[in-house]
Image (cartoon, rainbow, N blue to C red):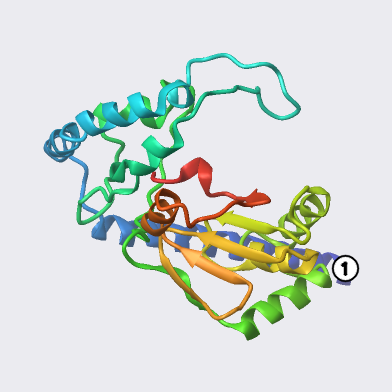
């Protein structure tokens, strides 16, 4: 009888918690809706008109990009993705300031402009799911704008113990660490990191033995660590064009390139 009572109490607690979560989410959604401007046909039309002025620049960029931007090409099967090769005119792409320009709106559009839908979805190859983020790092600072020596030291120590949470959890961090252990050019090399809100990837590279690291990020970051320098896209483009960027032994990116500019 006593066990039955305890079980009943447990079930009631679970039901109470579930109801609380449902009510909390419903209330939160209602609160968000109050602060979100409704998307109207007029708003969409306004954005389409605004972005239509970009079409000329987009088409110019597409011409410079050449084969690299032709997503309709078929590749040869690879381990994870199809392998596609392309001839790239790096100098022409880096001379194009448009590729790193800001959209110029007060807030990121809540809906993909119809005039750009094919570009965003790679001609319909990618399914669209609704989610909204307004994170204008370009021209601003990163989530952690100052990377101190003590912060990096702490991150490296956690990485060595296999307990660095990073941005996506301990298991993801350790998976990256394992991959970096087998990646050529990392140990003792000069490594480029593309996209970094906080220096967990950099900490993994330091742990493995990278000699120097350059982090490329939309938001400005000040690094106080002697082995890490940071750049925003305009600086990266400028140093490439004046031949002072130098070469890299390896390039690392985690959840950045695939949504850059979205």
Residue sitting at x 62%, y 16%: 75
Is 182 drawn above or below residue 13 in the view shown? above
Residue sitting nearer the eye, 19 or 61: 61
Is 108 drawn above or below residue 209 in the view shown? above
Mark 1 element type: helix
User: Is the residue marked by circle 1 packed among few (<14), some (14-19), or many (20+) residues within 10 Å?
Assistant: few
- Look at the image and tell me in which quarter the N terminus lies: bottom right
Q: Is residue 32 visible?
A: yes
Q: Position of residue 132 (x, y in %)?
A: 38, 49
Q: Is residue 1 visible?
A: no
Mark 1 = which residue? 3
Q: Position of residue 237 (x, y in %)?
A: 40, 51
- Look at the image and tell me in which quarter the C terminus lies: top left
Quadrant housing residue 29: bottom left
Q: Position of residue 228 (x, y in %)?
A: 59, 70
How many numbered tags mark residues here? 1
Residue sitting at x 48%, y 27%: 126
Seen in the image, is 103 located left or right of residue 166?
left
Residue sitting at x 41%, y 23%: 66
Considering every residue shown, the one lying at the far bottom of the view is 150
Residue sitting at x 72%, y 58%: 189
Quadrant housing residue 53: top left
Q: Position of residue 9 (x, y in %)?
A: 73, 69
């Amino acid at each position: 009888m006593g066990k039955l009572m305890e079980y009943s109490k447990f079930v009631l607690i679970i039901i109470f918690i579930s109801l609380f979560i449902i009510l909390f989410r419903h209330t939160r959604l209602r609160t968000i809706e109050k602060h979100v401007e409704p998307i109207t046909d007029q708003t969409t039309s306004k954005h389409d008109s605004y972005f239509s002025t970009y079409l000329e620049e987009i088409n110019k960029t597409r011409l410079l990009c050449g084969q690299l931007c032709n997503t309709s090409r078929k590749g040869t099967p690879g381990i994870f993705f199809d392998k596609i090769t392309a001839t790239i005119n790096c100098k022409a792409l880096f001379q194009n300031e448009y590729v790193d320009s800001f959209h110029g709106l007060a807030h990121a559009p809540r809906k993909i402009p119809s005039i750009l839908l094919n570009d965003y979805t790679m001609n319909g190859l990618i399914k669209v799911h609704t989610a909204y983020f307004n994170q204008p790092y370009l021209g601003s600072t990163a989530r952690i704008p100052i990377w101190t020596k003590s912060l990096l030291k702490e991150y490296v120590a956690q990485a060595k113990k296999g307990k660095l949470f990073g941005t996506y959890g301990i298991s993801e961090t350790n998976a990256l660490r394992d991959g970096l252990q087998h990646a050529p050019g990392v140990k003792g090399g000069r490594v480029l990191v593309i996209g970094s809100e906080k220096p967990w990837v950099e900490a993994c590279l330091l742990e493995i033995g990278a000699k120097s690291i350059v982090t490329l990020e939309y938001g400005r970051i000040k690094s106080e660590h002697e082995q890490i320098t940071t750049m925003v896209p305009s600086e990266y483009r400028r140093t490439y064009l004046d031949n002072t960027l130098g070469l890299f032994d390896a390039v690392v990116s985690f959840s950045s390139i695939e949504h850059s500019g979205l």
